[in-house]
Amino acid sequence: MMTYIVFILSIVFVMSFVGFATKPSPIYGGLVLIISGGIGCAIVLNFGGSFLGLMVFLIYLGGMLVVFGYTTAMATEQYPEVWVSNKAVLAAFITGLLSELLTACYILKDDEVEEVLKFNGMGDWVIYDTGDSGFFSEEAMGIAALYSYGTWLVVVTGWSLLIGVLVIMEVTRGN
Amino acid sequence: MKPPILIIIMATIMTGTMIVMLSSHWLLIWIGFEMNMLAIIPILMKKYNPRAMEASTKYFLTQATASMLLMMGVTINLLYSGQWVVSKISNPIASIMMTTALTMKLGLSPFHFWVPEVTQGITLMSGMILLTWQKIAPMSILYQISPSINTNLLMLMALTSVLVGGWGGLNQTQLRKIMAYSSIAHMGWMAAIITYNPTMMVLNLTLYILMTLSTFMLFMLNSSTTTLSLSHMWNKFPLITSMILILMLSLGGLPPLSGFIPKWMIIQELTKNNMIIIPTLMAITALLNLYFYLRLTYSTALTMFPSTNNMKMKWQFEYTKKATLLPPLIITSTMLLPLTPMLSVLD
């Protein structure tokens, strides 16, 4: 099973995305987002990106989602909407899950599946060794390069985050 | 909005477009688009009424979807070519996805539905920024990938945009919606020529931006958003009324004015590539555009609508609204035609 773990995790990833895309109340959406964030972290970990995966857990789940959860808990209503409470949400949820399962069966069916991207059966979701990657993990070298050669990228992303905060403040000001 | 915040947000809008135009890495281009979109949302929501909020939500949703499509195209290109540099895109699927994403950002048909609704829900100044500055970034990327664009797709989008822009604007009296349909039609003209001669697209974009800036500034002087309020302008600003006359004729593409330059050049480039029917169709449908511009000039400058007598005698106050750079804008949007032989420097 460990050779197919990325494939299985990708399937569960999409299914948990279906879980919040069907728009239950935000508190339940946040719950599924935590699960999908954790699974995304696991996928990144399986490709050898231990630092980045743990960053997802720490910053995304542990920082941003916690704040989101607190604000949603302050603003939630008495009987929030679950997946089974509303026929429309339930129908969308089941449709999403069935589509995902059908896609998975289609990929598993034969060895050569050509959709938009050429999926050669299971090969692209099985972890492979890229071969000559040297003694240092590529991902750690990438992060190091971000802070040395990629200073402009850090400046741009930092500025975008600041603008994100300012824009949210302006939009929710309301007077 | 507090002035420091307004300055930061305006600077970010410009920075976003600059990053899109000046980057050679697809990731930075996507970041530039997102920065631009994020920063323009509070500009669109300056007035906190539900109409403006609905307009900014629609803008955000369409632009975010287009950015996602662009990212998907970039990823597919990365998968097949192995590099992030903006160059010839060899995979047709990636090219089609990028073209679709960029035309969604521009408001070309069949993705034009958001343009009139968003433009109508926001103030005149925000509409001006939306219809002029926001077109620069996607156009620059289309220019950079122009050798790889599927001509059939873009020509179909361009032709339907010119048709939609012409027919859609016919039944409008709200000035912002008229300018939105005018934008759709002009984007159609620009998209038609990208795969043949991208320089003409830049020419059309420049002249379109000049004319649209002038038009919006003239509308903002009177704070008029409907044809009816334009028709009362003859008493307050008779000179502005004459300016609107020639500006509308220039937007419609009539010969002695500079709005004719891009249409002439585009038809010339298309016929050089053995296309006869498409430029004919585009020129004929540009007449629809001309009709509603003419209707605006008719009601503004050529006719006096029935009004009560005390509307005809207004106090002549000295107006204090600042029209930035209005005289040069009007002159460049109407009198540049004799300079067309300067285009021979391109050879």
Image (cartoon, rainbow, N blue to C red):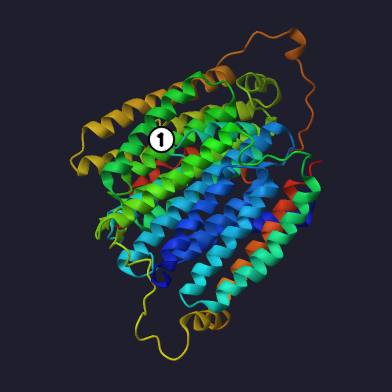
Secondary structure under tag 1 reads loop
Give the residue at x 48% y 65%. B27
Residue at mark 1: chain:
B
Q: Taking A13 as reference, is A112 left or right?
A: left
Give the residue at x 58% y 27%. B175
Q: B132 or B272, which lies in front?
A: B132
Q: Position of residue B41 (x, y in %)?
A: 64, 47
List the single residue furthest toward the bottom: A135
Q: Taking A11 as reference, is B12 left or right?
A: right
Q: Is residue B122 visible?
A: no
Residue A133 picture quarter: bottom left
Q: Position of residue B208 (x, y in %)?
A: 47, 41
Q: Position of residue A3 (x, y in %)?
A: 39, 72
Q: What residue is pinned by disc 1?
A: B110
Q: Is residue B268 visible?
A: yes
Residue B17 picture quarter: bottom right
Tally of numbered tags: 1
Q: B305 or B101, which lies in front?
A: B101
Q: Taking A95 as reference, is A52 left or right?
A: right
Give the residue at x 34% y 83%. A131
Q: Is residue B274 above or below residue A147?
A: above
Quick one: quadrant of the C terminus of chain B?
bottom left
Q: Is residue A34 above or below residue A97?
A: below
Give the residue at x 22% y 39%. B271
Q: Position of residue A80 (x, y in %)?
A: 72, 40
Q: Is residue A64 above or below residue A46?
A: above
- Amino acid tagged 1: Pro
